[in-house]
């Protein structure tokens, strides 16, 4: 799976980007926004497919209209460590984009699988962090739910 295409929706520096991600059900457009400080704050990502489960059990923040695809602490600490070793900024930004795309491939594949097979609740054997403070504790201890 890979991002097939990316296009800038408008010409403003902080405007959303959109692109297509392949998954077992085909291709879906994602919209990436809020990436003013991409090595500190993970971008906000959304997809308007009708089969996306829009609830927290499916790692979607309905109140913010976006996926919960990475923990803020995990993202920030990862790039802080790498910046401290003197890695090239363009490499870090490219890797941030690749991480976001790979994470969205995983999340969209799970959502599509749930839709296709009538899975109502996120299965426990699908590795993921919990939500909120519980997820941060799992990240810090290296334990998934």
Image (cartoon, helix red, strand yellow):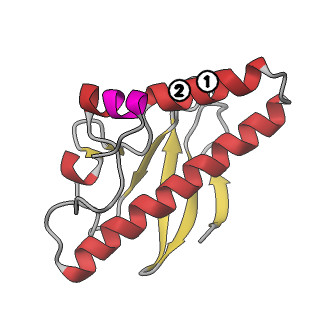
Left or right: residue 110 versus residue 86 is left
Extreme residue in the left direction: 120
**61 lies left or right of 74:** left
> What is the crowding at mark 1: few (fewer than 14 residues within 10 Å), some, or many (at least 20)?
few
Could you say whether the residue bearing mark 2 is in a helix, strand or loop?
A: loop
Crowding at label 2, few (<14), some or many (≥20) Cα neighbours within 10 Å? some
Q: For residue 58, which quarter of the picture?
A: bottom left
Q: Give the residue pinned by disc 2.
A: 41
Q: Residue at x 29, y 48 (%)?
A: 59
Give the tally of numbered discs.
2
Q: Does the magenta stretch include residue 105?
A: no
Extent of the magenta region:
136-141
Q: Is the magenta stretch mostly helix, strand or loop?
A: helix
Which label was assigned to residue 37? 1
- Which residue corresponds to the image point at 48% horizontal and 56% vertical from the top-left? 104
Label 2 close to label 1 by CB (< 8 Å)? yes
Q: Residue furthest top?
A: 84
Front-most of residues 15 and 49:
49
Q: In which quarter of the image is the N terminus?
A: bottom right
Residue at the image point whose x is 68% and y is 23% from the top: 81
Q: In this view, does 107 lie to the left or right of 13?
A: left
- In the rendered image, residue 51, in percent from the top left (x then y), is placed at 27, 69
Give the structural element (helix, strand or loop) at label 1. loop
Q: In this view, does 105 lie above or below 93?
A: below
**In the depicted view, which residue is nearer to us: 15 or 64?**
64
> Quick check: 42 above or below 98?
above
Give the alpha-carbon distance from disc 2 to disc 1, as whole Å.
6 Å
Task: Indicate the position of residue 44 as horizontal and vertical percent values.
Answer: 46, 39
**Residue 16's spot in the image, x, y percent?**
55, 42
- 53 relative position to 107: left or right: left
């Amino acid at each position: 799976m890979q991002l097939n295409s990316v296009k800038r929706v408008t010409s403003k520096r902080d405007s959303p980007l959109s692109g297509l991600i392949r998954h077992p059900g085909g291709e879906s457009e994602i919209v990436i926004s809020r990436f003013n400080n991409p090595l500190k704050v993970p971008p906000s990502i959304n997809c308007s497919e009708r089969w996306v489960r829009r609830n927290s059990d499916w790692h979607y923040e309905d109140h913010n209209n976006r996926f919960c695809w990475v923990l803020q602490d995990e993202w920030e600490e990862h790039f802080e460590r790498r910046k401290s070793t003197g890695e090239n900024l363009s490499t870090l930004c490219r890797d941030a984009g690749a991480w976001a795309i790979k994470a969205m491939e995983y999340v969209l594949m799970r959502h599509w699988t749930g839709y296709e097979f009538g899975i109502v609740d996120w299965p426990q054997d699908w590795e993921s962090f919990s939500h909120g403070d519980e997820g941060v504790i799992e990240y810090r201890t290296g334990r998934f739910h």
